[in-house]
Image (cartoon, rainbow, N blue to C red):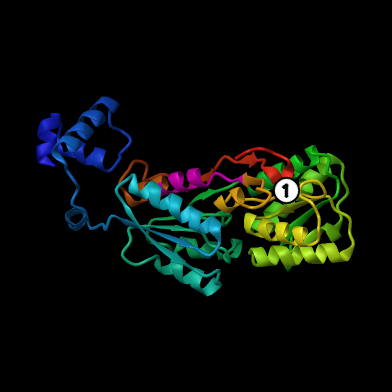
């Protein structure tokens, strides 16, 4: 580091700031340090840095289930965002189990400096757990209302509303939704409830009547569950000309069941999902979806966590909520050509 500082004509501290991607470095100075790093082949000694600072250079990511493609792709985005900051990531999975999620909140992940956590079973009633957290924590997914923790999430209601508006814009009037929660409670902060809320709001705005027969339960959100719910919908005899699946995994199952029944997509039934996972490019037809801003979620969350760890600015700030931008991706399953 001293050699880099001498060549770049800066202090050791400035080199450290560049290596750790601190934001408040003049662009010209940053470029000069980066040229010196490249010329000298300098690589930070993470072990030595950890011994000096008491930190590991490793952050944790806990998600419900890596078998769900969305969470696997989220982990990939978090790892990429961390690597840009010269950090490593340990990934754990809570298995969508409440007791396991509580244990994660209480203990974090071992040998990490902080945690990004996407809980599935915890809710507003668990707010008190967050008051006891003594390590840097950023929540992903739906906000535990009133909690003291930074939170990075997506526009579930608005994204769902946009999905249905897209279908309405195609002239569809009998729009089913697949993925409602089995208990059918309202007023919850679960993604299923929020997305169903957006679905219903879009129907009201479009002047379309709500029909409970078009709201289909599916849990968990895997392709088999989407297929089973769609087969039940078909067997019920209820007329429908579009399906909004609450995630893309469910939508893959919806496409399968419609194909088995000889329903043409999008001619007979238009289909849109949510999450914009990579699989959607390769279904037949390709799957329209809501892109919830996964890369933005990962980038912002890692940055917030680093601030909480103390490697950046703003560690004394209060809890923040960030909602990533979303967009409608119209592919073949709704007659679009997006790639």
Where residue 2 appears, as percent x and y from the top left, is: 10, 40
The foreground one among 311 and 172 is: 172
Compare residues 113 and 146 and report the one nearer the observer. Answer: 113
Question: Does residue 38 sit above or below 290 in this rendering?
Answer: above
**Would you place residue 248 above or below residue 36 in this image?**
below
Q: Is residue 154 left or right of residue 54?
A: right
Residue 327 occupies quadrant: top right
* Crowding near the residue tagged with mark 1, few <14, some 14–19, many ≥20 C-alpha atoms within 10 Å: many
Q: Magenta stretch: give its range.
A: 291-302
Image x and y of residue 33, in percent: 20, 33
301 drawn magenta: yes
Which image quarter: residue 91? bottom left
Q: Is the magenta region chiefly helix, strand or loop?
A: helix
Counting labels gives 1
Q: Which residue is mark 1?
A: 198
> Residue 52: x percent and y percent?
17, 54
Q: Is residue 177 above or below residue 27?
A: below
Say if the magenta span includes residue 252.
no
Residue situated in front as seen by the camera: 86 or 52: 86
* Residue 324 picture location, percent across and down: 55, 42
Seen as rendered, the residue at the extreme top is: 28
Q: Is residue 74 among what the camera can see?
A: yes
Q: Residue at x 19, y 57 (%)?
A: 47
Q: Is residue 288 left or right of residue 204?
A: left
Residue drawn at the location 55% of the way across and 71% of the way down: 98
């Amino acid at each position: 580091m001293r050699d880099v500082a001498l060549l770049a004509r800066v202090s050791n501290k400035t080199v450290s700031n560049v290596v750790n991607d601190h934001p408040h470095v003049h662009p010209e100075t940053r470029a000069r340090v980066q040229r010196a790093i490249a010329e000298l082949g300098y690589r930070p000694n993470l072990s030595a840095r950890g011994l000096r600072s008491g930190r590991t250079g490793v952050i944790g990511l806990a998600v419900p289930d890596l078998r769900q493609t969305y969470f696997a792709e989220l982990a990939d985005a978090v790892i990429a965002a961390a690597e840009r900051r010269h950090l490593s990531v340990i990934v754990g999975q809570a298995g969508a189990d409440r007791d396991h999620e509580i244990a994660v909140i209480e203990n974090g992940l071992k040998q990490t400096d902080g945690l990004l956590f996407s809980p599935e079973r915890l809710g507003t009633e668990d707010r008190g757990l967050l008051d006891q957290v003594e390590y840097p924590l950023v929540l992903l997914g739906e906000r535990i209302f009133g909690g003291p923790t930074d939170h990075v999430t997506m526009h579930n209601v608005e994204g769902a509303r946009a999905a249905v508006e897209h279908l309405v814009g195609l002239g569809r009037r009998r729009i089913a939704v697949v993925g409602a929660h089995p208990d059918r409670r309202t007023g919850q902060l679960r993604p299923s409830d929020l997305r169903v809320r957006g679905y219903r709001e879009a129907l009201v705005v479009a002047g379309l009547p709500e029909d409970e027969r078009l709201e289909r339960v599916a849990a968990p959100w895997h392709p088999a569950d989407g297929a089973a719910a769609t087969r039940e919908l078909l067997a019920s005899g209820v007329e429908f000309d579009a399906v909004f699946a609450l995630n893309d995994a469910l939508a893959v199952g919806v496409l399968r069941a419609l194909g088995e029944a000889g329903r043409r997509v999008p001619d007979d039934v238009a289909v849109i999902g949510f999450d914009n996972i990579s699989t959607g490019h390769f279904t037949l037809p390709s799957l329209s979806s809501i892109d919830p801003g996964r890369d933005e979620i990962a980038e912002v969350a890692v940055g917030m966590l680093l601030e909480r760890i103390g490697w950046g600015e703003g560690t004394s700030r209060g809890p923040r909520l960030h909602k990533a931008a979303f967009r409608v991706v119209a592919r073949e399953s709704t007659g679009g050509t997006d790639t």
